[in-house]
Image: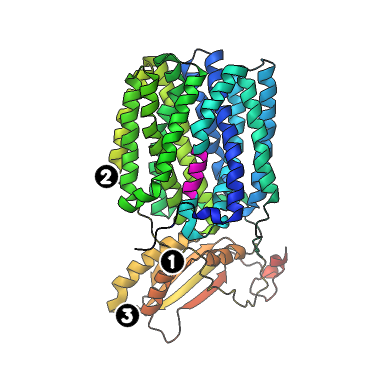
Amino acid sequence: MPDRISTLAPFRHQTFRTIWIASLASNFGSLIQAVGAAWMMTSITTSEDMVALVQASTAAPIMLFSLIAGALADNFNRRSLMITAQTFMLIVSITLTVFAYLDLLTPWLLLCFTFLLGCGVALNNPSWQASVGDMVPREVLPQAVTVNSVGFNITRSVGPAIGGAIVAAAGAAAAFAVNACSYLTLLYALFRWKPEKRDNALPRETLGRALSAGLGYVAMSPNILNVLFRGLIFGLTASAILALLPIVARDLVSGGPLTYGIMLGAFGVGAIGGAISNGWLREKLSSESIVRLSFLGFAASAAVIGLSSSTIVTAIVLLVPGACWVLALSLFNTTVQLSTPRWVVGRALSFYQTATFGGIAAGSWVWGLLSDAFGVSVSLSIASLVMLVGAAVGMRLPLPQFRDLNLDPLNRFNAPMLRLDLQPRSGPIVNMVDYTIADEDIPKFLELMSDRRRIRIRDGARQWGLMRDLEHPEIWTETYHVATWADYVRHNQRRTQADAEVWDAIRVLHKGEEGPRVHRMIERQTIPPAHDIFHKTPPDLHH
């Protein structure tokens, strides 16, 4: 068994260390703001549904806009995107502070401000999470994800309590002002960071094609699809406790904003414990066992919280879902990152965030409606039962174990010398590969080509097919399309070291004296005489 890597290993890398420390201040402010917003909503409305919607309004933009943010993160400078997001949230926070100070906030206006802050988070998160892999080596990535969770939950353990004290002493406007100041430290750290520039001679993908490529990759990656589904269920069910916690503090234990802050702090302390034990648990238990225990921990906690009328008992119980929250979400995040090459990691993470935060947003709304209709205790009891169902789903769809996949680029592709003067946008391009396969090798060949089809489509190919020559049955032809010549080059550059196993196994089965013969063609349905593409310099390819 390889030596265990220390949880603190990411701190040996200065860029990660600097931005992590700056993130502490930003997270601290965000949690104080969250306490102020949640408690202000309990002050300006009696609707329990509106209180639960505070969390939903923050999570909904992450569900709605993460896909676009992920595509931007893979095609633009991630540092610039993070600076833009942080600046936007700074402006929104200042405006929210002014409105709160002047007593101009209504329930729906408060939800609009929290929604806008959620939009900033949606833009920031894919770039930040994808950048972690640029700041630390791949073998330290699980520890970096865990340390990020530790950082957030260090602030969560004390931030809400301080936020509750600030709200109780100076009002919600003071909490919003603290949040506005907290963005300044992270902006300073981002301006100082000078990431390595990625050279790419190809034109940047359009937003539509970038989204399509990301969707294609995720759709043909069973491990990622599994994580997305489990993340959706987890967000849908586990959101009940955090969404209804202000009502628990107000109604079940008859507390105020400080009580609510202390309860959130207890949740954060539990999360720190979960983050610290993360590495040890991964050595002892499978990924699925950890996720299943997280569902069960939330289920038991929700049932007890719904019945408790004691602040102390509720705070102690909240340690459990806090630990389960960070264990499950950090495991989902790490699995996605370790299953995804760098060219598409931002988009893969955005799909994960869309699924998980979509579940959180929908769940927060549903549990708020149930609480309005039947009371907070009944709503938490129902949520507890649904969480048990979420744990049972793992019996049919278990989470994959971490695999040591080398997802670095294979770098075997060399652009061929062309006799036609193609432009990057020229196309469609049709690729055909001829193989000579002996009869006894056909079953193994077809099995390998099934994997090859998945890899081709995952990396951007369309209309993939496999044909057998009727007159020479030993000859098999693989064919697929891509939209343009630039897309063809991208498709080949996306091949990873892990894919080489399939490629090499197919080459071993090929019986020709030379390697498989590749035909690269440009498709035309009609050929007007004046624009015959078989001329060496066709006019239409210059425009």
Residue 176 on image: x %, y %: 63, 26
Segment tinted magenta in the rendering: 145-153
> For the residue marked with disc 2, what is the amino acid?
Met
- Packing grade of label 1 (10 A; few <14, some 14-19, many >=20) is some
When the figure is inspected, residue 11 is found, relative to residue 408, above or below; the finding is above
Percent position (x, y) of residue 137? 52, 60
In percent of the image, x 49 and y 41: which residue is there? 354
> How much space separates mark 1 and mark 3, taking CA atoms?
26 Å
In the image, is residue 286 above or below residue 66?
Answer: below
**Residue 199 in view (yes/no):** yes
Query: Can see residue 399?
Result: no
What residue does disc 2 label? 395
Report, in whole angstroms, how far the alpha carbon at label 2 lies from the one at label 1. 28 Å
Q: Which residue is the site of mark 1?
A: 498
Which residue, given by chain and number where applicable, does mark 3 sit on?
Answer: 438
Per the image, label 2 sits on a secondary structure element best described as loop
Marker count (numbered): 3
Q: Going 52% across and 74% down the picture, which residue do you hit?
A: 412
